Every structure is written in structure tokens, then in C-alpha cells.
Amino acid sequence: MVDLGYATRESVEAAIAESRANGRRTGEVLVERGVLTPDQLSRVVAERFGVDQIDLGVFKVDMAAANLLPSSSAKRYGAVPVKVIDDRTLLVAMIDPGNVLAVDDISLMSGYEVRPAVAPEQDIAALIQRL
């Protein structure tokens, strides 16, 4: 966050301390405080995990892909399949691409290898509600 110029080291350290004290994610604290926008947070997460960032306001979601995952699982994992890339790979927009359990479960449920990507939490939540 600091390297990308989105936040000062002090604001990040304060958010880390608050997240540890309250059991919340640091990114959520930074967005709540207005230090980061949801889009900036998703870019930071994408950079951290070396995955793509998807703008669900622009990206056309393939509903056949989205329906490969039950909505209850999509809610639980904060993840929505958005496109079948090829005969083996499914692109999945996620809040937390570092959730290995979610990636593995989605792969088992869908029958595809999962290629995680990051999207803002509010965008994923809105998409899940439309499913």
C-alpha cells in the first residue's frame, strides 16, 4: 500500500494495530477510515498475491460459469466464477485469493482448475445477490 502510494506507513501501522485488536482485516479498516478506496484495496491484494484484478462493473460475467458454484458457497468464500478460460481453467473473482481452502473447494465443486483474481468485496457481494 505504501509502495503504491496509497497510504502512509503510519496509517497502515495504525490499521494493523486496530485489526489485531478487533479481529478485522487490515484492508477493511483502511477502507472504513477512508485511507483506501475499495478499488485500491483490490489492487493491493492483487499485487500481493500476484493475481489479476477484475473490475466487475466492466467485465462481462459469463452466467454459465457463475452457476458452476452454488450461491451458498459463493457467499461463504466471497468468490464468484466469472469465465471459463479454456477446457480446464475457471477464472474466479475473489475477495481473498490467498484462501487456499476456497480455491481447492471451488475447484472440486466446479471440476475446473481455479485461476483466482481479485475484485472489490462490494462488487462481489452485489454479484452474488444477483445469482
Image (cartoon, rainbow, N blue to C red):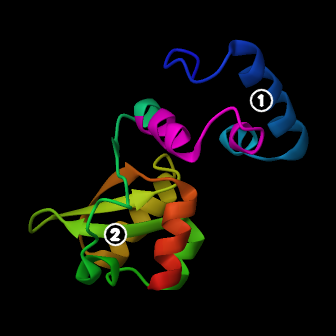
Residue 80 painted magenta: no
Q: Residues within 10 Å of mark 1 (few under 14, many from 20)?
A: some
Residue with the mark numbered 1: 16
Residue 57 image point, x, y percent: 38, 61
In the rendered view, tell whether residue 48 sits above or below residue 3: below
In the rendered view, tell whether residue 81 sits above or below residue 42: below
Residue type at mark 2: give it.
Answer: Pro
Q: Which residue is drawn at the image coordinates 53% and 81% (left, top)?
A: 129
Residue 55 image point, x, y percent: 37, 53
Residue reaching furthest to the left: 87
Residue with the mark numbered 2: 81
In front of the other: 2 or 69: 2
What separation in Å lies between label 1 and label 2 (alpha carbons)?
30 Å
Q: Which residue is drawn at the image coordinates 31% and 59% (left, top)?
A: 58
Per the rendered image, the range of residues in magenta is: 30-46
Q: Are marks 1 and 2 in contact (CB under 8 Å)?
A: no
Q: Hey, which quadrant is residue 68 in on the image?
A: bottom left
Residue type at mark 1: give it.
Answer: Ile
Q: Which residue is drawn at the image coordinates 51% and 14% (left, top)?
A: 3
